[in-house]
Amino acid sequence: QLVESGGGLAEPGGSLSLSCAASGDIYAVYTMAWYRQAPGKQRELVATQTVGGNQYYAHSVKGRFTISRDHAKNAVYLQMGDLKPEDTAIYYCNADIKVSHDVSSTNYWGQGTQVTVSS
């Protein structure tokens, strides 16, 4: 349901962007988010954006990362700037999706994409 792209290797101070698009039977997409999980650490919330446009950023990325959405494409993006080695992690897309008008929304995860920040 969620297909991610982007990521890769960047030097400290560099930039990378991630994309995630929902596909399949979709009636509505509600909050979309990005999480990340570094080796040996728990998965943590990076940023979210609601349907209404409200955004949340983790303190560690505020001012460096920007989340955005394309509602027509059921997509969410994460523009990452001023990258630091501690941003190295697998990044996961997450979304609440309603597949039909008569069912509740379900939370979905993407497969994850690796982001490595190293010189």
Image (cartoon, rainbow, N blue to C red):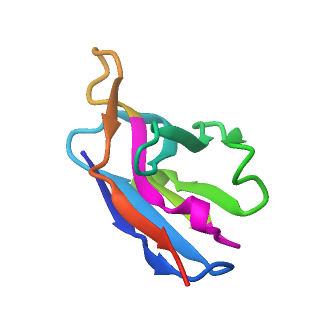
Q: Is residue 78 magenta?
A: no
Residue 24 quadrant: top left
Instruction: Indicate the position of residue 6 as horizontal and vertical percent values.
Output: 40, 71
Instruction: Indicate the position of residue 80 as horizontal and vertical percent values.
Output: 61, 67
Instruction: Indicate the position of residue 111 as horizontal and vertical percent values.
Output: 27, 51
Q: Is residue 13 left or right of residue 1?
A: right
Please tell me which residue is depicted at 49% across the width and 50% down the height of the picture: 71
Q: Is residue 8 left or right of residue 66?
A: left
Q: Is residue 48 left or right of residue 61?
A: left
Vertical arrangement, residue 47 with respect to residue 106, above or below: below
Instruction: Indicate the position of residue 101 as horizontal and vertical percent values.
Output: 31, 21
Please tell me which residue is depicted at 37% across the width and 64% down the height of the picture: 114
Vertical arrangement, residue 9 with respect to residue 50, above or below: below
Please tell me which residue is depicted at 41% across the width and 41% down the height of the picture: 94
Q: Residue furthest left?
A: 24
Residue 57 quadrant: top right
Per the rendered image, the range of residues in magenta is 80-95
Q: Quadrant of the N terminus?
A: top left
Instruction: Please tell me which residue lies in front, 23 or 2.
Output: 2
Q: Is residue 82 magenta?
A: yes
Vertical arrangement, residue 64 with respect to residue 108, above or below: below
Vertical arrangement, residue 96 with respect to residue 1, above or below: above
Q: Quadrant of the C terminus?
A: bottom right
Please tell me which residue is depicted at 51% across the width and 60% down the height of the picture: 77
Instruction: Please tell me which residue lies in front, 37 or 57.
Output: 37
Residue 3 quadrant: bottom left
